[in-house]
């Protein structure tokens, strides 16, 4: 017993800290976040195209699936020590909640953002997405496509708001649907490839 205590004390004196490493047997949370992002993005941009009004269905998706769902996934990615996944999913989950707030808060008496403020909001999210897009160069091709389309989407929406252009916003709607579908594809690929234990849908 004395030898063991002495060894521990010696390690402490040398500033060495023992770390217990556990094997990670938890499931991959990323497909859930990708699906939440993809489905919510498609639904909102179908509205931007003009197929239906901005209703409670879109807002509910923005709060729960695109919003809270992605935040939960971000926390799961944090536990897996995935910095990129933590920042991306948590941030876009909060993006959806802030977007719902921008839509709902003016109905409660708060001032609605003008075109300049809304454009700045969208441009900043576009710039943030550009930073993450650069990060995807070390990841798979599927995510590169998702983030590239997302950067373009935010920039188109920002320009559309800045110039109050319905045609640009409608074009952004089509591009946004494509962006959402790309996110769903990557999420589906991760699920199906894992289930079938082979490459069903390639993501590069």
Image (cartoon, rainbow, N blue to C red):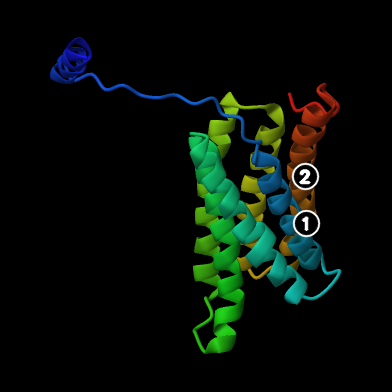
Residue 141 visible within the image: yes
- Tell me if label 1 and label 2 are in contact, CB under 8 Å: yes
Residue 122 sits in which quadrant? bottom right
Q: Is residue 170 visible?
A: no
The answer to which of marks 1 and 2 sits earlier in the sequence is 1
Q: Which residue corresponds to mark 1?
A: 42
Where disc 1 sits, the SS reads helix
| Nearer to the camera, 69 or 115 | 69
Residue at figure coordinates x 79%, y 46% from the top left: 181
Horizontal and vertical percent for residue 142? 72, 32
Q: Residue at x 76, y 42 (%)?
A: 182
Residue appearing at x 19%, y 10% in the figure: 3
In the figure, is residue 108 to the left or right of 194?
left
Q: Using residue 157 as the reference point, say whether residue 170 is left or right of it.
A: right
Looking at the picture, tell me which residue is in the foreground, 97 or 52: 97
The residue shown at (49%, 85%) is 110
What is the crowding at mark 1: few (fewer than 14 residues within 10 Å), some, or many (at least 20)?
many
Q: Of tags 1 and 2, which is closer to the observer?
A: 2
User: What residue did someone put label 2 on?
Assistant: 184
Looking at the picture, does residue 56 appear above or below residue 134? Answer: below
Q: Secondary structure at mark 2?
A: helix
Judged from this view, the residue extending furthest toward the bottom is 109
- Viewer-closest of 9 and 117: 9
Q: Residues within 10 Å of mark 2 (few under 14, many from 20)?
A: many
């Amino acid at each position: 017993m004395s030898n063991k205590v002495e060894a521990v004390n010696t390690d402490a004196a040398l500033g060495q800290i023992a770390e217990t490493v556990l094997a990670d047997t938890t499931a991959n949370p990323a497909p859930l976040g990708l699906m939440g992002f993809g489905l919510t993005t498609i639904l909102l941009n179908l509205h931007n195209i003009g197929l239906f009004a901005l209703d409670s269905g879109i807002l509910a998706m923005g709060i729960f699936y695109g919003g809270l769902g992605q935040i939960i996934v971000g926390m799961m990615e944090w536990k897996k020590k995935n910095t990129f996944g933590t920042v991306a999913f948590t941030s876009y989950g909060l993006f959806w909640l802030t977007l719902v707030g921008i839509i709902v808060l003016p109905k409660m008496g708060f001032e609605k953002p003008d075109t300049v403020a809304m454009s700045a909001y969208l441009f900043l999210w576009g710039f943030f997405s550009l930073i993450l897009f650069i990060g995807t160069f070390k990841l798979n091709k599927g995510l590169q496509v998702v983030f590239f389309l997302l950067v373009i989407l935010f920039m188109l929406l920002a320009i559309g708001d800045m110039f109050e252009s319905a045609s640009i916003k409608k074009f952004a709607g089509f591009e946004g649907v494509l962006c959402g579908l790309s996110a769903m594809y990557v999420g589906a690929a991760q699920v199906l490839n894992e289930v079938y234990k082979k490459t069903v849908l390639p993501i590069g």
